[in-house]
Image (tube, coloured by chain):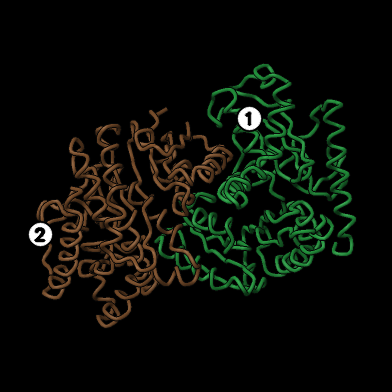
Chain colours: A green, B brown
Amino acid sequence: MKKPLVVTVTGAAGEIGYAITPSIAFGAMLGEDQPVTLKLLEIPAALPALEAVKMELFDCAFPLLQEVVITDKPEVAFKDCDAALLIGSRPRGPGMERSDLLEANAPIFVEQGRAINDHASRDVKVLVLGNPANTNALIASSNAPDIPVTRFSAMIRLDHNRAVAQLAYKTGVSAAEVSKVIIWGNHSSTQVVDVHYAEIGGRPALELLDVEWVQHQLIPEVQNRGARVIKLRGKSSAASAANAAVYCMRDWFGSTPPDDWVSMALASSGQYGADEGLFYSMPVIVEDGDPRVVEGLALSDTCHQFLQVTLDELRSERDAVRKYL
Amino acid sequence: MKKPLVVTVTGAAGEIGYAITPSIAFGAMLGEDQPVTLKLLEIPAALPALEAVKMELFDCAFPLLQEVVITDKPEVAFKDCDAALLIGSRPRGPGMERSDLLEANAPIFVEQGRAINDHASRDVKVLVLGNPANTNALIASSNAPDIPVTRFSAMIRLDHNRAVAQLAYKTGVSAAEVSKVIIWGNHSSTQVVDVHYAEIGGRPALELLDVEWVQHQLIPEVQNRGARVIKLRGKSSAASAANAAVYCMRDWFGSTPPDDWVSMALASSGQYGADEGLFYSMPVIVEDGDPRVVEGLALSDTCHQFLQVTLDELRSERDAVRKYL
């Protein structure tokens, strides 16, 4: 049997945590032959609910689940961690500006970055879901100087999957037949949905789709979908966010499918005009756990303009949290 | 590619429905090579929330998911259904007696039984989770005279898994090493947790466990665990119930592991003194989709006494809903 991997989940008693922890223990994320130990972090007030999460994980009798540790201490949660899902964050309250949200979350990701630096496995993979995810990933990685920045990512996969699903639905194919979608930039409303390179059943998507539909239906649909889900269920997307994290980590620990890529927000090393170090979503191919940005794609002038907007947003977020970096 | 199977889920916008539908679409229940169509039933008031469930399933971009149908009409939900999870039921309200609960739920399962009879695939498999599950299964199957009664079951797997997990934890092994646990009778507080035949790592459990611990720790823990989870999280078990249903259906559509059995509440044909037709949990071996009760196990006098209590409860439940059968 393989050596167990330690998976750390923060905010684990929240809705996404409740959805994702059984999937991980079942084997959906790291494979049905990979034993796992779960280390679950919460704020002290949520520890009773987290105890219930632990009980239920236990009651699933998962063959792969070795142990469940629950704690409110980052140094315990990140001890020997191989994969970390940073889900917990302060939500945006009434009257809060984006700058207030950045300020409220920064200390959380400073503390967790330091704990990862001091206690996690040296080849840990860290996926940040808590918003503003890209800048929180920047803060966490900046506070983990001993861990390569390539070990951090901010999640854009839900947006990616939403775009894939819309293309599949529109053309009447399975999601598995849609490839090479790109979400560029920030996981925010400035994200850029790009189907120029997308293929559907191996054919260029733009041969099958009307440009009007792409601009006026697809892109707004992907951008506004989260808000529509909240309106209908009274709570934000949890199951689909958990699933996106599972698929993102599965690809990151393994390989992306042949002739395809996924969108991942990695620390830029200057590709596509993004400032070095900014967490910027780009098309990424993963081979045996090693992600590589797909470089040199030609972009339209319009696309360039939109990329500038999302880049400027990421710069202003970085500037707002400069003292935490 | 295999022909898609239709999976119907009732109460699909509830907590268990929200947890189980992505698992099914991911392939956890029927296999990662089995395409599925989901048909989701809710009461009219829950249709907006169900629309959000559909949107999120869509946003997961599951390669196996062919279609999601949402409806408040049983005849639509059960059309061509191959696997049905009857989760939705009226919960027990303040001041409700068990007889009130039976009465409140009976019409739901009459209607669904009829819809299954008239619209489902002839070899459908129906798992009832909505409580009182055993008697609801009796009502549904009684109202589906054209479907063999062997196609219905009430879920006891969560209790089974809870007992397995306790034995594994107590003896420091993986849940995969615990076999031949039995939960007898009704999915209620009268259920009988039986470890006489249980094995841990191939050795008889009773050689490894203290009888005092079994009687005074294990059995009350399994019986009261649901209430403890409710107290801690303020809501009843959802993730672990969903997982139990996934595992139960996976075994039922496939085979139970070699040298093991699972507990399933099937319509008795008189085994172990249960009245013919009552849905009574027993040890069951499944081979290629075909469940068979393990017969002829010798039971202790004490076990016999407990079985009488759970049997009497099931008889009184049946008598209370006689007019619906």
Occupied quadrant, residue A201: top right
Residue A112 against residue A222 in the figure, above or below: below
Numbered mark located on residue A234 in the image: none
Residue A320 against residue A252 in the figure, above or below: below
A275 horizontally vs A265: left or right:
right
Chain at numbered mark 2: B
A147 horizontally vs A319: left or right:
left
Chain at numbered mark 1: A
In terms of depth relative to the viewer, which is nearer, B223 or B246? B223
In terms of depth relative to the viewer, which is nearer, A190 or B263? A190
Residue shown at the point (36%, 73%) measured from the top left = B171
B160 horizontally vs B34: left or right:
left
Q: Secondary structure at mark 2?
A: loop
On the question of residue B262 being in view, the answer is: no
Mark 2, residue position: B296
Occupied quadrant, residue B300: bottom left
Tell me the crowding category of disc 1: few under 14, some 14 to 19, or many 20 or more residues within 10 angstroms, Cα based: many
Mark 1, residue position: A179
Residue shown at the point (18%, 39%) measured from the top left = B148
- Mark 1 and mark 2 in contact? Answer it, CB < 8 Å: no
In terms of depth relative to the viewer, which is nearer, B269 or A280? B269
Residue shown at the point (22%, 44%) measured from the top left = B141
Find residue B211 and report its horizontal and vertical position in percent.
Answer: 24, 80
- CA separation, marks 1 and 2? 56 Å
On the question of residue B127 being in view, the answer is: yes
Find residue B204 and report its horizontal and vertical position in percent.
Answer: 23, 70
Badge count: 2
